[in-house]
Amino acid sequence: MDRMIYLLNVSVSGVKCIEDEIRLNFYKKTIDKDFNPDSYRIKAIYGENGAGKSAIITGIKIFYDYIVGGNYLNETKNQKFLAEIINKKTKKFTIAFEYLVNLSDDNLVYRYTLEIGLNENNMFVVNSETLSYKNGNYPNNNYSNIYESKNGELTNISCEGNVGDIKKKTANLLSTNSFAYLYIMRFTKEQNTDNSLLAHIMLFIIFAATFKIYMAEEDQHELYFMRKNIKERNINNETFGVDFEEYINELDKISGVNEKYIRKEDYAEYRSKIGRLTEFIKLFKRDLVSIDIDKKDNGDVYVCDLNLNYGDYLVNKEFESTGIKKLIRLFDCFDAASGIGIVFIDELDSNLNDVYLCKIIEYFMYYGRGQLCFTTHNLDPMSVLKENKNSIEFLSSDNHLVSWVTRGNASPENCYKNGMIENSPFNIEASDFVGILGE
C-alpha cells in the first residue's frame, strides 16, 4: 500500500538536559499536491556526549507510552521515572508534532501538542493536550481545533454529537489520560459517534501506533492491546475516502519478533517473521542454521522464546553476544521502517560493525518506505547520508540543532571533526588527558 502518514517535524522541551524547545524537521519545503517525501525519510543526529540526543528520543518515548499505554500517568513507576527525567528547572515536559495525512484527493496536516507538569500534590498530570488540522495544500491557513483539554477539562471539541455528554464522561479523567485514547477505547461503543471526529482521532491513534522506539532493554506490549482495540471499531471509510482497515492491518507488520505473547491467530505471521529474522541474522553470522521457536500454550496466546540453532548446539537469544542480541531487537525497528513505521533508535551504532551500519542505512535511503531517525557517534554514515536531503543534524551542548548543507567539496565528517559546525567545536587535544589518566 502507499504511505499515508508522514511525520513533518517534532518539537521537544523540558526533558533531561533540554530546557528550551528543540525542533527536528524532516521536511522543510512547502507542501502541495505534488508532495514527495522520498528524499526526506531518514535522519541522523550527531552531538557531543550529554548534548541531549537521547533526551529527544526519551521525549518521543514518553509520548508513545502516554498514548498507546493508556494509564501511563496513573502508574507509580512512571511517576517516579518522570520525576527523574523531566527537566529540574522547567518542571514540565512539552512535545509537539506536525504530520501529514496524504489522502487520495487532498493533503491534511495535523498538529498535536502535549504538556505534562507537576500539580499541587507533586504528581505529574496533563496540563494541556490539543489536536488540530488544516488543509496541507495551503501553507498559510490556520489550524482548526479537533479537541483541546486544559487542566483536566475538555475545553474545545469539534463534534456534532452530544458535547455535554462527552464532557461528562471524560470528567476527572483528562488529568491523566489522552482524550483521543479515551474516545477510541471507551466511548465509541456507547454512543452514536460523529464520523468526522472519529476519523480525525483514528488517524491520530494510527499515527502514534506507527511509532517504533529503540532505547534500553525493555519489552513493549502496549501496541498489542492498541491494535486489538482499534480493529474492533467500526469506522465509516467514506469520511475521508480512507481505507482504515487496510492501514490498520499494516500495524501488524510493526509488531514483531521481540514480542513474547503471540495470539494464536497471529502465530503463522509470527513464524514467517522469524524466518525473515533468520535470514537477516545470517547476513552477520553465517554459521547460523535457523532460529527455533520454543512456544508454550497459554489460553488464547502462545508464550514464545527464541533459540539460535548452530547445528551442533542451541543458544537462547538472551545468552547471545551483545551485538547479535541488539540486531535481534533492532530487526523489529528495521522491519517497521521498511514499511509504514516512524522509527526512532538511540545509539544505532553501538555494537554494530561500521561496514554493516553503513549498508543498513544505505538500504533505507534507497528501498525503505517508512521514516528512520537515529542518534549516533559514528561518523562513517555521514558519507552515505550527505547525498540525501535534510538527513544530518548536529546537536550542540547548548541544545541547538544545525542541519548539514552542502559546502562545496567539504565533507560533513571533516567539518564536524575540525570544529567547523556552528555551536559544535571539539576543543580537545590528546595532551589534555595528561595528568588525568597518567603521564
Image: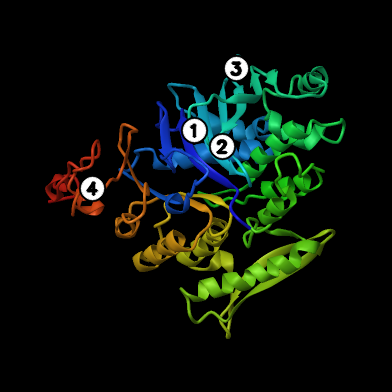
Residue beneath the point at 48% across and 36% down: 10
In space, the residues marked 4 and 2 are separated at their CA atoms by 31 Å
Circle 3 crowding by C-alpha within 10 Å: few under 14, some 14–19, many from 20: few
The residue beneath circle 2 is 62
Query: Cβ–Cβ below 8 Å for labels 4 and 1?
Result: no
Q: Amino acid at mark 2?
A: Ile
Whether pointer 4 and pointer 2 mark residues with C-beta atoms closer than 8 Å, the reply is no
Q: Quadrant of the N terminus?
A: bottom right
Which residue does the numbered mark 3 point to in the structure image? 119
Amino acid carrying label 1: it is Ile
Which of discs 1 and 2 lies nearer the camera? The answer is 2
Tag 3: amino acid: Asn
Q: Position of residue 95 (x, y in %)?
A: 52, 31
Apparent side of residue 70 relative to residue 19 in the rendered image (left or right): right
Q: Which residue is mark 1?
A: 85
Task: Residue at 50%, 51% (x, y): give it.
Answer: 371
User: Mark 1 packing: few (<14 Cα in 10 Å), some, or many (20+)?
Assistant: some
Colour mapping used in the image: rainbow
Q: CA distance from mark 3 to mark 1?
A: 16 Å
**Mark 4 = which residue?**
416
* Vertical side of 340 occupied by 118: above or below: above
Task: Say whether marks 3 and 2 touch (CB < 8 Å).
Answer: no
